[in-house]
Image (cartoon, helix red, strand yellow):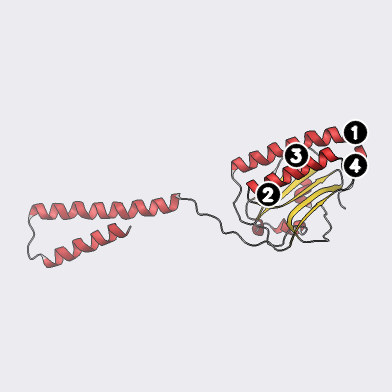
Amino acid sequence: MAVGILGGLGLMLNRFLTPSLTASQSRSDALAVIESAILILVTILWQEVQAKIPESVVLDGEEGFEMEPALGELLKTELAWASYTLLTNSATKVIVIWYGGKVLLKRGIYPKEREIKLGAIAQRVLKTQKPVYLVKLSLYPGKIEFDYLPENTQGLIIQPLEDKGLMILGANAPRSYTKQDENWVEAIANKILFTLSKSEMNNPAACGGVSNSKEI
């Protein structure tokens, strides 16, 4: 853009300082003006096309890692791996896994001693079994139902675990999850479901498989 502006200013200055112009010089000046305008326009369009990196914040809360103690070792290992993978390879800063009326895992940055109660958005995900991605949580009035996450959570994915559970991921920047991230979250959720199904066959009570409670 700077080159285009400087070129245009140079042409104007040259025109003022030239007492008389030939026809060929007028044509050259016209072409130069067009070139300067194109340079400026291309720069503006390029800035519009390039995606801006969303601004991140420091989430309110403390770092923690809690897991349901009654879970089997296989499921504990699976949940620990899944949560670590999401926290280190995506924008996720906090993850909650709720299943069968129990919180199986909380990990990342979150307020301590907060009761987890599923609100309307989470209940709808359970019912439809379709994930929801809230790209900028502050824009949604329903954000108050996620008070068990940091108050300044910027983005949120609610991934269903069939109709029995949810995997809730919070990010510290809006619009920070890509389509590839969403696919990755879904794949990990499916892997967790497979391990949960095996654990339920061995120990249904440990996963809350017989409970219909919606809060803890």
**What residue is shown with label 1?**
202
Mark 1 element type:
helix
Query: At label 4, which amino acid type do we have?
Result: Ala
**What residue is shown with label 3?**
129
Whether residue 104 is visible to the viewer of this picture, yes or no, is: yes
**What residue is shown with label 4?**
206
Q: Nearer the viewer, residue 207 or 45?
A: 207
- Kindly report the distance in space between the C-alpha atoms of the residues bearing marks 2 and 1: 29 Å
- Disc number for residue 213: none
User: Reading the chain from its start, which is encountered first: label 2 or label 4?
Assistant: 2
Mark 4 element type:
helix
Q: Position of residue 207 (x, y in %)?
A: 87, 41
Query: Which image quarter is the N terminus in?
Result: bottom left
Residue plotted at (23% across, 63% down): 9
Mark 2 element type:
helix
Residue plotted at (69% across, 39% down): 186
Q: Nearer the viewer, residue 102 or 199?
A: 199
